[in-house]
Image (cartoon, rainbow, N blue to C red):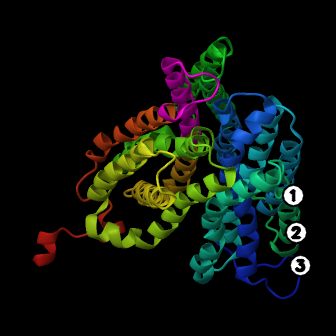
């Protein structure tokens, strides 16, 4: 997609690209913040809703699921109605979902509100990038993207400690109240400063049938797996899993017989993309389970306050941010294949160490270990997210990005599901009562770690020189020559 010169919302002086970037940053911050802030509140919400703490996983899954389902439709929505209009609407949908979350009196109503909230959040990041492409000159684009991506770091970093403070000193409902003023402010800033771009004159036909099949498949399969982890949920899970499986096979057949499917499965024929998708999917199961399991272990297993739990969990986001500064240098030193292979092992072992945590461990030691976990995972996902496009034809990059982003959100959601199922299974085998014990969390961390360890065999299948132009890595012997 080509960029255009900076426009203005109305005739007059062009809007500075930094203002446009910060307006987009406001929307992205809410999406990123809301994906992490809820974790520390789950035990308190479970007590108020009179459900077991592991059952609260569905509140996180619902939000991530809607992101996965609706992200592929964001480009088509922008083409049909204009990016500014769709972004403005998505902000209102997100705010409405936040208000309904704050008013929820039961787990089912919270899940419904989280689905609505996710429907608004799904459009924010993709449309933000699209607006920057349309409204910012090429010479300012890198700088504009840097400004807009600041909240991608601040959201996960501030979410756990702020959520812990709110739960400890106010009420968990304030977690959702704070989205309201931010969202309303963001809406008026979008209307005031974001240039209007008319709907596209040449629209690529939207794969509506594929969208429906894909949405039904993802929704039914994920909620079916989620129901398995709930008490007496097998009866409800089986029909969902059957419908989801049928829809999945229907989409696989459909994708082979249309020119532009919603998610183009033929992209998997490209080695670097396929291996990055599979390895990243397995690693994201562990990464998705971590923000669900850690707050429960700290608050229920260890008896820590929500505030203390939030401060510890913040370490993973801090480690991820610090690693971003070192990733390019490390990739130049190791190359993609060696880097993903050895760091993939460190990433898995890092979270396995969480199984050894005990309440009497020094908080500083747990903080440092979690910081290392976040750093290792950050490097791994940065490598996946870039090497996936090595050798990708330019005309297919957009489709590949949609496919990859959708799967990324889906596997994070699947990680929450798997973590909840593993914890429930361990509790059943261990004979635990209504609340999980420290030993149950330890065994669950080992289980989710085993999933990410299976990614190592896929790392071995990467070509030794994969991503060479991207990383700038040269083998030692070649440098000497």
Q: Give me the residue at 68% from left, 33% from top.
A: 58
Q: Residue under label 3, please give it.
A: 10
Q: Residue under label 1, please give it.
A: 180
What element does badge 2 sit on? helix
Write down the region rendered in magenta.
Answer: 411-439
Answer left or right for 42 relative to 343: right
Q: Which secondary structure class fits the magenta region best?
A: helix
Label 1: few (<14), some or many (≥20) within 10 Å?
some
Mark toward the viewer: 2 or 3: 2
Q: Residue under label 2, please give it.
A: 191
Quadrant of residue 478 within the rendered picture: bottom left
Q: Position of residue 431 (x, y in %)?
A: 53, 18
Q: Nearer the viewer, residue 36 or 20?
A: 36
What element does badge 1 sit on? helix
Q: Give me the residue at 57% from left, 20% from top.
A: 245
Q: CA distance from mark 2 to mark 3?
A: 11 Å
Answer left or right for 336 relative to 362: left
């Amino acid at each position: 997609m080509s960029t255009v010169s900076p426009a203005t919302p109305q005739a007059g002086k062009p809007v500075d690209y930094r203002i446009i970037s910060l307006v987009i940053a406001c929307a992205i911050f809410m999406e990123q913040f809301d994906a992490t802030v809820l974790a520390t509140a789950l035990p308190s919400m479970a007590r108020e809703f009179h459900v077991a703490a592991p059952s609260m996983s569905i509140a996180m899954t619902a939000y991530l699921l809607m992101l996965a389902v609706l992200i592929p439709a964001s480009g088509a929505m922008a083409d049909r109605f204009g990016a500014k209009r769709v972004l403005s609407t998505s902000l209102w949908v997100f705010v409405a979902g936040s208000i309904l979350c704050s008013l929820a009196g039961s787990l089912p109503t919270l899940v419904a509100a989280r689905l609505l909230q996710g429907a608004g959040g799904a459009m924010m990041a993709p449309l933000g990038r699209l607006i920057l492409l349309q409204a910012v000159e090429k010479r300012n684009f890198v700088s504009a993207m840097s400004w807009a991506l600041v909240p991608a770091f601040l959201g996960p970093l501030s979410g756990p400690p702020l959520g812990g403070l709110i739960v400890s000193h106010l009420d968990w409902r304030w977690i959702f109240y704070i989205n309201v003023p931010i969202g309303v402010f963001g809406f008026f800033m979008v209307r005031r400063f974001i240039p209007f771009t008319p709907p596209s004159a040449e629209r690529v036909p939207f794969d509506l049938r594929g969208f429906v099949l894909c949405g039904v498949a993802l929704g039914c399969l994920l909620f079916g797996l989620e129901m398995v982890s709930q008490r007496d949920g097998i009866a409800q899970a089986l029909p969902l899993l059957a419908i989801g499986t049928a829809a999945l096979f229907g989409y696989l057949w459909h994708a082979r017989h249309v020119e532009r499917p919603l998610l183009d499965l033929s992209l998997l024929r490209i080695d670097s993309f396929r291996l990055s998708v599979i390895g990243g999917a397995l690693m994201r199961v562990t990464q998705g389970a971590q923000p669900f399991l850690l707050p429960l272990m700290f608050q229920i297993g260890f008896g820590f306050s929500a505030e203390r739990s939030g401060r510890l969990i913040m370490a993973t986001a801090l480690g991820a941010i610090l690693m971003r500064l070192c990733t390019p240098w490390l990739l130049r030193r190791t190359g993609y294949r060696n880097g993903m292979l050895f760091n993939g092992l460190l990433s898995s072992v890092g979270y396995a160490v969480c199984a050894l945590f005990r309440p009497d461990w020094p908080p500083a030691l747990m903080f440092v270990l979690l910081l290392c976990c976040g750093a290792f995972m950050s490097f791994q996902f940065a490598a996946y997210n870039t090497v996936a496009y090595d050798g990708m034809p330019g005309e297919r990059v957009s489709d590949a990005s949609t496919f990859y982003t959708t799967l990324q959100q889906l596997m994070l959601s699947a990680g929450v599901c798997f973590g909840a199922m593993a914890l429930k299974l361990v509790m059943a085998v261990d004979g635990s009562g209504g609340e999980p014990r420290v030993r149950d969390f330890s065994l669950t961390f080992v289980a989710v770690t085993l999933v990410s360890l299976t990614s190592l065999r896929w790392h071995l299948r990467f070509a030794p020189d994969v991503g060479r132009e991207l990383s700038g890595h040269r083998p030692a012997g070649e440098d000497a020559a």
